[in-house]
Image: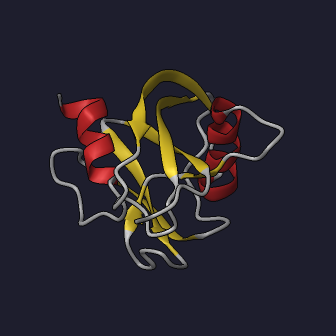
Amino acid sequence: MVEVRALATDAVIVLEGEVVLLERAHSPFEGSWVLPGGLVEPDETAREACVREVSEEVGLDVSVEEFVGLYDDPDRDERGNVSAAYRCTPVSDDTPTPRKEARQVETFDPADLPEMGFDHEQIVTDTLLD
């Protein structure tokens, strides 16, 4: 049984009809494509963490538009983390750039995603394709 350790946040960002993904530079799921996101710090809300993590990982300033859902399947993350997922919109014309924890950043057609880590394909589907 996995014990829940922390709350994370994940961002679904669409640029010109494509979703922003990053290739993870470390485990778990090293080398996999994932949504920008990360752990919520003790002094911030999940929404604040989402905005911060997007900036840190892909260099975009975003606004949180919609809560997508809480993803808490015990098998989603070997560390036991659950995630609050949000649909976000860029607030500038910046280009996504790999930063902290990202090998590279690309945009993908939501209907033709690469193999993804965690449950991020489900999060994209729940946000954009349902």
Query: Which quadrant of the figure contains the C terminus?
Result: top left
| Residue 68 position within the rendered picture, expressed as x and y whole percent measured from the top left | 40, 28
The residue sitting at 71% across, 43% down in the picture is 52
The quarter of the picture where residue 14 lies is top left
To which quarter of the image does residue 69 belong?
A: top left
The residue nearer to you, when weighing 36 against 3, is: 3
Answer above or below: position of 52 versus 2: above
Where does the image place residue 9, in percent across and percent down from the top left? 55, 44
Q: Is residue 97 above or below residue 45?
A: below
Residue 7 x/y as whole percent:
59, 46
Q: Residue at x 61, y 47 (%)?
A: 54
Task: Name the residue located 32 percent from the left edge and 54 percent from the top edge.
Answer: 119
Answer whether residue 108 is visible to the viewer in this image: no
Quadrant that contains the N terminus? bottom left
Q: Nearer the viewer, residue 70 or 105?
A: 70
Q: Give the residue furthest to the top.
A: 65
Q: How is the image coloured?
A: secondary structure
The answer to whether residue 95 of the structure is visible from this angle is yes
Is 121 on the left or on the right of 74, as rendered?
Answer: left
Q: Count the marks.
A: 0
- Above or below — where is 108 with respect to 117? above
